[in-house]
Amino acid sequence: MSVEQALLSFALVAGLLTLVPGMDTALVLRSAVSQGRGKAYATALGINTGALVWGIAAAVGASALLAASETAFTVLKIAGAVYMVWLGGRMLWKSFRRRPADVPGPAEPEASASYATAWLTGVGTNLLNPKVGVFYMAMIPQFIPPDVSPALMGTALAMVHNLEGLVFFSAIIWGTHVARSWLRTPAVVRAIDRVTGTVLVCFGVALAAEAR
């Protein structure tokens, strides 16, 4: 398998998986609605940064060590579960909290969270999910041709996945922007926070309870 064939084959597989809605999709959608396009892109780039780190780690064998070590896997799994439950719980708390400003009409994007916070949220959500590491460990080694640097090839493959993810996230972000007047009404914002928060909490609980 040549480098070009490996990149094209991986792009097809990763592209199909990118289209499957998941936690990352919910997080970017929620950010686009409540924080605006800029911070939604910051969240998306954070998710992509985490994926890039996992991709490089898989290529050089760190993910193989993670999969082989019961302790490492368990520690990362629990850390990721706690983080996701905390993040989702915070969204749920905010959505149910009574606010005097909750009146009919479009809501303004949140200004409290910085771009760095949005980026770190994406990074943390991705890096603390061992399933992402296991996915890359299972997939990337199969697409590394002989006599090619694993680290460089792993980076290239992860970048392909990141590019596809960014295109997908952009469609979500710009689609949200088109319907921003409706999506930013307080009732819709609360509903999206509740759905996203519930997804994160359920994912965190399932991650913690999942048998290896």
Image (cartoon, rainbow, N blue to C red):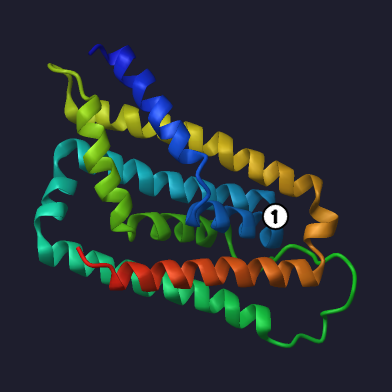
Q: Is residue 83 left or right of residue 106?
A: left
Q: Position of residue 138 (x, y in %)?
A: 23, 40
| Residue drawn at 49 percent across, 53 percent down | 22
Give the farthest residue toward the front.
211
| Residue drawn at 71 percent across, 42 percent down | 174
Q: Is residue 117 left or right of residue 129?
A: right
> Label 1 belongs to which residue?
36
Q: Is residue 20 above or below residue 116?
A: above
Determine crowd level at label 1: few under 14, some 14-19, many 20+ residues with C-alpha closer than 10 A: many
Secondary structure beneath dot 1 equals: loop
In depth, the one of 206 and 192 nearer the eye is 206
Q: Is residue 112 above or below residue 171?
A: below
**For residue 185, which quarter of the picture?**
bottom right
Give the farthest residue toward the right.
104
| Residue drawn at 49 percent across, 57 percent down | 23
Q: Is residue 2 above or below residue 167?
A: above
Q: Position of residue 12 (x, y in %)?
A: 42, 26
| Residue drawn at 35 percent across, 41 percent down | 52
User: Which quadrant is the C terminus positioned in?
Assistant: bottom left
Q: Position of residue 106 (x, y in %)?
A: 86, 65
User: Which quadrant is the N terminus positioned in?
Assistant: top left
In depth, the one of 7 and 115 nearer the eye is 7
Q: Is residue 154 above or below residue 203?
A: above
- Looking at the rendered structure, the number of numbered marks drawn on it comes to 1
Look at label 1 and name its amino acid: Gly
